[in-house]
Image (cartoon, rainbow, N blue to C red):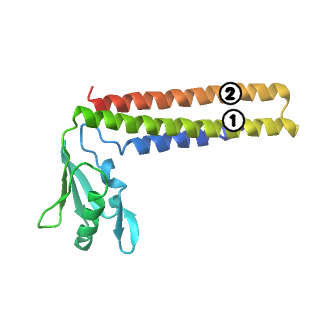
Amino acid sequence: MDIVESHKEEFNKVITFLKKDLSSIRTGRANTDLVAHILVEAYGTKTPLEQLAALSVPEPRSIVIQPWDKNIVKSIEIALSSGNLGTAPHVDDDGIIRLNLPALNEESRKNLVKVLHSKLENARTSLRSVRDKVRESIVKAERDKEVTQDDKYRLFEDLDKLSSEKQDEIKSIGERKEKEIMGT
């Protein structure tokens, strides 16, 4: 039984979560991911915006939100206003909500990079946590005589290799996102 291989999915989940988490960080262009996961108080429960409205990006710096139920327009407006987007929502007479995102200046780009680095560090911490858990499983397996000492060291090498690959992946994802934020 390969202990490292059986935990590979946990490593992949960290990367998947990071990618989803980073999609909410604004870059130079508008993106529906900025608002899709904002929770709106509707029908007595908090629901992600993407389940309550059609989201589109008609122009590079604007997002259009078309609620499927006109009765929740005010709730969506409140949720967007408290969503820290750096802009206020504008509601048309027909119930369509528009978000016009201001251009990013140097200071806001630097702040976004700080948020990015924080999220990357959280991903690295999660990765180390998974690695440590797998390492403990290997040690336990050796103690329980399920693997030999030689197998333990081989598994440690496999684990270190996998951890290193995932750390490199986090680094490259971060570098790409930082370039997007800084507009280079």
Q: Nearer the viewer, residue 166 or 88?
A: 88
* 172 with respect to 132 (left or right): left
In the rendered image, the residue lying farthest to the left is: 93
Farthest residue to the front: give it.
Answer: 107
Q: Disc 2, disc 1: CB below 8 Å? A: yes
Q: Left or right: 13 with respect to 22? A: right
Residue at horizontal 84 percent and vertical 35 percent from the top: 142
In the depicted structure, whether residue 105 falls above or below residue 93: above
Q: Secondary structure at mark 1?
A: helix
The quarter holding residue 110 reads top left
First in residue order: circle 2 vs circle 1: 1
Q: Is residue 67 above or below residue 155?
A: below
Percent across and percent down for residue 174 are: 42, 31
The residue at 19%/39% (across/down) is 103
Determine the secondary structure under disc 2: helix
What x and y, as percent, mark residue 13? Answer: 54, 43
Q: Which mark is residue 158?
A: 2
Label 1, on which residue? 4
Quarter of the rendering occupied by the C terminus: top left
Residue found at x 28% / y 62%: 53
Q: Residue at x 69, y 35 (%)?
A: 4
| Location of residue 130 by image quarter | top right
Q: Position of residue 90 (x, y in %)?
A: 16, 58
Left or right of 103 on screen, residue 121 = right
Q: Quadrant of residue 117?
A: top left
